């Protein structure tokens, strides 16, 4: 199992002051030295975290592959910067983070064209999608190399069931009316859904990644799924690094998923 460390939240800290501290390139080297197999960055249209200057420096200097998340709107930049892989994600200006998978059905022609453009430039392509058969099939037909399954629903169910989220202002609105028994059942169904999606994608020859909302407590259940090659994890690693330092936080996550 490979670990992709998403360093966007380090860039958020830098962007908050608009100075060169903390240096995100240093984070790339520290991650690589402590078990990361890949660096993931999301060049958002509003550049709210990683900016073009850092994206270029990271791609030019990273000792490990750089996976760049992006919406259609920044494809020209991705083609110019040439990361190892582009992960197409949906992006809404007002969202705090990527809220769901790409709607491949309603943007298939655009997705296919974009994949062709990227592959012509020898950039591998992943699509960030919901774990369902229709989306996987379209990703395959569109020419993607990898599918990354959005684990947001899994993470939300897990947090509502096992964490303290239930009693906080951050409780997930759609899940608040569920009893613990219902949450348990929904979580089990979601895990089964992800397992089936992984098996189907593997059958088609697609590589499978997963990510969103994974943390030190819930990652074991996703890491145990046969056929997932890579997990992309950001928020929980950067959050833990406040207490442990970034190298320890990366090392601890790496140890959990590489058991
Ligand atoms: N994978 C993708 C495609 C994402 O968009 C994100 C969030 O930026 C992640 C993984 C990492 O999610 P988190 O920060 O919740 O670990």
Image (cartoon, rainbow, N blue to C red):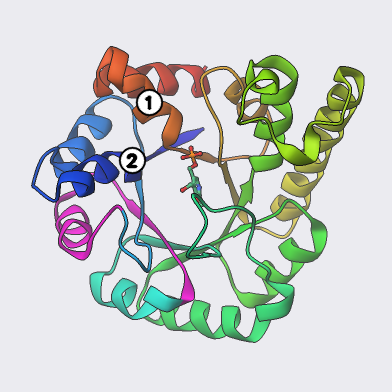
**Residue identified by numbered label 2:** 9
Q: Is residue 199 left or right of residue 57?
A: right
Q: Position of residue 130 (x, y in %)?
A: 70, 54
Q: Is residue 254 left or right of residue 214?
A: left
Range covered by the magenta-colored residues: 49-72
Residue under the point 25% across and 18% down: 245
**Can you tell which mark lies on residue 37?**
none
Between 185 and 223, the residue placed more toward the observer is: 185
Between 145 and 157, the residue placed more toward the observer is: 157
Residue under the point 55% across and 63% down: 145
Residue under the point 56% across and 42% down: 211
Between 19 and 154, the residue placed more toward the observer is: 19
If you read the primary sequence from the N terminus, does the residue marked by circle 1 or circle 2 appear first? Answer: 2
Magenta residue check for 56: yes
State the image quarter where residue 248 is shown.
top left
In this view, which residue lies farthest toward the front? Answer: 169
How many marks are shown on the rendered structure? Answer: 2
**Can you tell which mark lies on residue 239?**
1
As helix, strand or loop, the secondary structure at mark 2 comes to: helix
Q: Is mark 2 within 8 Å of ligand 1?
A: yes
Instruction: Relative to 117, say whether 126 is above or below.
Output: above
Q: Position of residue 31 (x, y in %)?
A: 27, 32
Q: Are marks 1 and 2 in contact (CB under 8 Å)?
A: yes
Q: Position of residue 227 (x, y in %)?
A: 66, 39
Residue under the point 72% across and 24% down: 160
State the image quarter where residue 43 is shown.
bottom left
Q: Position of residue 126 (x, y in %)?
A: 52, 61
Q: CA distance from mark 1 to mark 2?
A: 9 Å
As helix, strand or loop, the secondary structure at mark 1 comes to: helix
Q: Is residue 55 left or right of residue 227?
A: left
């Amino acid at each position: 199992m490979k670990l992709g460390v998403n360093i966007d939240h380090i860039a958020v800290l830098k962007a908050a002051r608009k100075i060169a501290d903390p240096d995100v390139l240093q984070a790339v080297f520290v991650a690589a030295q402590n078990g990361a197999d890949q660096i993931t960055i999301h060049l958002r249209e509003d550049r709210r975290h990683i900016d073009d200057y850092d994206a270029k420096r990271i791609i030019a200097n990273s000792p490990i592959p750089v996976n760049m998340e992006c919406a259609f709107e920044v494809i020209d930049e991705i083609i110019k910067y040439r990361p190892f892989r582009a992960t197409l994600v949906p992006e809404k200006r007002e969202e705090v983070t990527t809220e769901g998978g790409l709607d491949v059905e309603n943007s298939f022609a655009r997705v296919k064209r974009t994949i062709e453009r990227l592959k012509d430039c020898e950039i591998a392509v992943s699509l960030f999608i919901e774990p369902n058969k229709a989306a996987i099939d379209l990703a395959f037909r569109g020419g993607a190399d990898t599918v990354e399954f959005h684990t947001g629903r899994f993470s939300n169910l897990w947090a509502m069931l096992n964490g303290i989220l239930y009693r906080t202002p951050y409780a997930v609105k759609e899940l608040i009316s569920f009893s613990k028994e219902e949450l348990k059942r929904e979580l089990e169904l979601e895990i089964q859904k992800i397992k089936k999606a992984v098996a189907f994608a593997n059958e088609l020859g697609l590589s499978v990644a997963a990510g969103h909302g994974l943390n030190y407590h819930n990652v074991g259940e996703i890491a145990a799924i046969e056929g997932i090659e890579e997990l992309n994890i950001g928020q929980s690693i950067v959050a833990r690094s406040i207490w442990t330092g970034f190298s320890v936080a990366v090392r601890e996550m790496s140890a959990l998923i590489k058991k």
